[in-house]
Image (cartoon, rainbow, N blue to C red):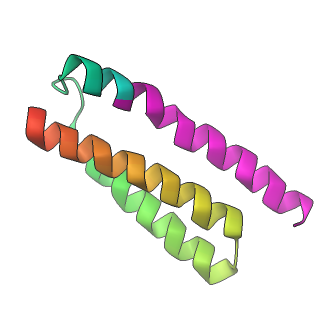
Amino acid sequence: MNNVEIIGFIAGIFVAVSLLPQVIKSWRTRSTKDIALSWSVINLSGQILWIVYGVYIGSLSLVIMSSIALVMNIFMVVLKLKLG
C-alpha cells in the first residue's frame, strides 16, 4: 500500500465517521425531521459514484471507505423514511 492510499483511508475515515453522530442521534431520538431526504439521496448517489470511480481507478481505500459511508447513509435514509 502506498502513501496515497494511506491518505485515502484517513480521508475516508473522516468522511465515514462524520455521518455517525447523526445516525446515533436520529436512532436515539427517533426523529429525523430536521434531515432533508433530498440531502440523503444526493449523498447516497455521490457515495455510489465514488465507489464506481474507486473501482475504475483501482483505489482500495476509496472503495472501502465509500462503502462504509454508503451503508451509514442507507441507514439514515431508512430512518428518515420510517420516522419521517
For this view, does 2 lie left or right of residue 23?
right
Q: Is residue 83 visible?
A: yes
The residue located at (27%, 27%) in the rendering is: 27
Q: Quadrant of residue 82?
A: top left
Residue 26: image location, x then y, percent: 27, 25
The N terminus sits in image quarter? bottom right
Q: Is residue 2 above or below residue 38?
A: below
Q: Is residue 51 above or below residue 4?
A: below
For this view, does 36 lie left or right of residue 83?
right
Is residue 5 covered in magenta? yes
Residue 16: image location, x then y, percent: 54, 43
Q: Is residue 37 visible?
A: no
Residue pushed farthest top? 29
The residue located at (36%, 32%) in the rendering is: 23
Please tell me whether the stretch drawn in magenta is mainly helix, strand or loop.
Answer: helix
Residue pushed farthest right? 3
Residue 48: image location, x then y, percent: 42, 66
Q: Is residue 40 above or below residue 3?
A: above
The residue located at (31%, 51%) in the rendering is: 74
The residue located at (24%, 46%) in the rendering is: 77
For this view, does 8 lie left or right of residue 62?
right
The C terminus sits in image quarter? top left
Residue 17: image location, x then y, percent: 55, 36
Residue pushed farthest bottom? 56
Write the start and end of the magenta stretch as one range.
Answer: 1-23
